[in-house]
Image (cartoon, grey):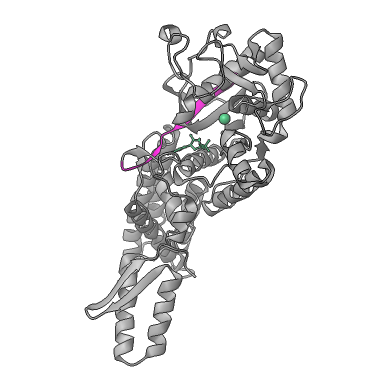
Amino acid sequence: MLHLYNTLSRSKEAFQPLKAGMAGLYTCGPTVYDYAHIGNFRTFTFQDVLKRYLQYCGYAVRHVMNITDVDDRIIQNARERGVGIRDYTRHFAQAFFEDLEALGIQKPDQFCYATEHIPEMVSLIRRLEEKGVAYRQDDSVYFNVSRFPGYGKLAHIDFAGIKPGARVDTDKYLKEDARDFALWKAPREGEDFWETEIGPGRPGWHIECSAMAMKYLGETFDIHSGGIDLVFPHHENEIAQSEAATGVPFCRYWVHGEHLLVNSETMSKSKGNFYTLRDLLDRGFDPAAIRYLLVSVHYRKQINFSFEGIQHAAVALRRIHDLIDRLAAVRQGAAGSRSLAEEAIAKARRGFESAMDDDLNASEALAAIFDLVREANTLLDQDQVGEEQARDIEAFLRRADSVFGTFFRRSELILDEEVEKLISERRQARLDRQFRRADEIREQLVRRGIVLEDTRDGTRWKRSLSAPA
Ligand code: AMP
Ligand code: ZN
């Protein structure tokens, strides 16, 4: 049975959905003011594995993801470029969808744009005003945190010691208490705004997720997920404003993923230490290997990102691909040892499922897969794998890959030793005066992002930094 670490209880809990056989999942989507970076995609990829494993366990998953297409940065960037926020954000939303596809991340059942849900947010804010937990100041509306006794239960922060005036939110608006947060922001000079029943303005970020999650998944739903930076204040505020309005629990399992780091620092736009997926693809890295790197580490452990890490991922993936090729090459009608193959598969299945059931322990689940790879290779060496066994092993790998989504995606990444081999083949072709063949090899390498430089000491090579032609 699947157990998930719930940030709310700080413990692993057996997953029991509200409705038998169904799982409602809300994941906070990107703020589309720029291309998402590979750290963001670590979170989206782990959520994809969570969703796929729920499906593996037989749940019908309803997955909702928001697209934040209005916030301060968006308004500012769009204004600087002289375009409307819709035109500005649609470009980055489209890029985000393309990146999801490149990484094999399943599309949510429902994408929802903040700007298309203003009436839902306004009506939630009105409910909060009617209950007396929201107040107005300078035409903005704030949530009154002191009226919600459970505030801090997700982040496990005791606010008793925090004095009014200490800033815990970076909001530039004035409010009564430092913890209070904006539900609705009055328009500022030259900014886009909506005319609504609660006055002109635009929504705060937190209200967006509450309104959309409840619209599509109900007032109480199963799982809410994001990166750990979202625990506070974003998710804490979502809980406060949702539960203050409805009086029922908002979400039952809060699942947060650790960050991806570069040189021990969180990858982020503001630090400038980030790569987009596009940057990596332009450098010739393969999306299947990038996905493998992202999914192979337990989601509650940090990943230290490096190019070598992607290379190692490609090598690991290649071992699985090689086995799949060997299995495909088993002759039709060949006989083998049914019991040995069945035993190896059953052991791998047990290892895979018990690791994934234990809070999605992907690295252990993959270890079980690699045990099978090793055993299957040994059985193949001993001619113990017949047609039926080859089919069964492949079928198990496909089933496990319904979760990982990489084993059957061929790596386009060319490994160092393959480059070396092609370069020595090219050298030989030139010695043999087969210049056409030598040119062919050079072009093949260039297409795969490898730049050659012929020097007196031989041919040097490196991976190109720009997109292969
Ligand atoms: P944003 O577009 O900034 O709202 O972020 C989208 C998602 O990426 C959120 O779930 C964040 O928690 C997550 N995120 C941001 N930075 C990182 C990082 N360095 N590693 C992993 N996830 C991240
Ligand atoms: Zn959110």
Residue 393 visible in the displayed image: no
- Residue plotted at (40% across, 40% down): 271
Quarter of the image where ligand 2 sits:
top right
Q: Residue furthest front?
A: 189
Q: Tell whether position 170 is magenta.
A: no
Is 461 rendered above or below residue 75?
Answer: below
Count every numbered label the image shows and give the total. Answer: 0
The secondary structure that dominates the magenta segment is: strand
Q: Where residue 321 sits in the image (x, y, percent)? A: 42, 61
**217 sits to left or right of 455:** right
Out of 381 and 210, give the one closest to the viewer.
210
Out of 256 and 467, give the one closest to the viewer.
467
Q: Where residue 399 sits in the image (x, y, percent)? A: 51, 49
Q: Where residue 132 sits in the image (x, y, percent)? A: 66, 7
- Residue plotted at (43% across, 77% down): 443
Out of 144 and 368, give the one closest to the viewer.
144
Quadrant of residue 430 in the image? bottom left
Magenta extent: 248-263
Is 213 rendered above or below residue 327?
Answer: above
Out of 278 and 380, give the one closest to the viewer.
278
- Residue plotted at (43% across, 16% down): 156
Q: Tell whether position 258 is magenta.
A: yes
Residue 281 visible in the displayed image: yes
